[in-house]
Image (cartoon, grey):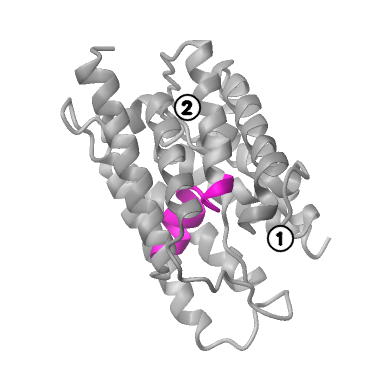
Amino acid sequence: MGRILPGLVVGLIFGAGLTLSDMVNPARVHAFLDVAGAWDPTLLFVLGAAILPSAIAYLIRRRMGRPLIESAFSLPESRSLDRPLLLGASLFGIGWGLVGFCPGPALAGLVLGTWQPFAFVAAMLAGMALHTVTLSRSTR
Amino acid sequence: MMEPLAPSLAVAGGLLIGLAAALFLLLTGRIAGVSGMTAIATRIGSGGTPWSQATAFLVGLPLGTALVAFFVRKPDVVVTSSVPLLIAAGLLVGFGTRLGNGCTSGHGVCGVARLSPRSLAATAMFMASAVATVFLVRHVMGG
């Protein structure tokens, strides 16, 4: 229970934020990405506002020896810009641009009464599995 | 045309997303990344977040969505994409986020906030490629 409750609460806050800010609506995301069309700045406000508490937490973290419920911080240490990172990010961006779903909003969409997120999430899991069976050993 | 969203809602929602990332860091010492936790919860991949916690996060996320949709504001989810397009996009997002070790949450919200060079590069890359994709589909191919 010690790990489940924090996961649940944090997930709940995260999902509430995505929904309040309309990031669960692919049309809203597309309108941000479409810089040559009727541009909508919403995503920029959302991302900017999200980075603020997150950045404050990283500053607080510097004064903490360990996190509140685990024995140590476990953050990625690597700083190298390698090919898998850049290739993966560009493939992700193509998929994101095609329909306007990234993983969080797609999962949130499962409870909003439309069927499309189910098709997207199924394919997303297949894509993740494809990575695991083909490449995961060489990129870890 | 879509109604503009009140900037106060955008900012309030963004602050909640950031608060979630902040709590996750200070409580567990880890990055709140949705793609990574999805892979862990489904046992497709492995990572630092324990299975039970990743699964609880993925249960909580749609729960938070449902609560806001019910009590505050029911969002329109407008998806115009066809099934083949949804599948192609899903495959690219799934494969790409695993290969690149993160998505909009892990790289975009957490990584940028801690000024991780990898996350800054990944965020610039997926933003640029998404903008280019939308430009091609909407204005060049005329979709």
Disc 2 residue type?
Answer: Lys
| Residue A31 against residue B124 in the figure, above or below | above
Task: Residue B104: say if magenta.
Answer: yes
Chain containing the residue with disc 1: B
Magenta-colored span: B98-112
Q: Residue at x 62, y 37 (%)?
A: B62
Q: Quadrant of residue A122?
A: top right
Q: Residue at x 59, y 46 (%)?
A: B98
User: What is the chief secondary structure element of the magenta stretch?
Assistant: helix
Residue A135 in percent (x, y) is at: 65, 46
Q: Which residue is mark 1?
A: B49
Q: Residues within 10 Å of mark 2 (few under 14, many from 20)?
A: some
Determine whether, in the image, residue B45 is placed left or right of residue B71.
right
Q: Nearer the viewer, mark 1 or mark 2?
A: 1
Q: Which residue is mark 2?
A: B74
Residue B68 in view of the camera = no
Task: Give whichever of B27, A71 is nearer the camera.
Answer: A71
Gap in Å between the C-alphas at discs 1 and 2? Answer: 31 Å
Chain containing the residue with disc 2: B
Task: Give whichever of A140, A77 is nearer the camera.
Answer: A140
| Residue A8 against residue B87 in the figure, above or below | below
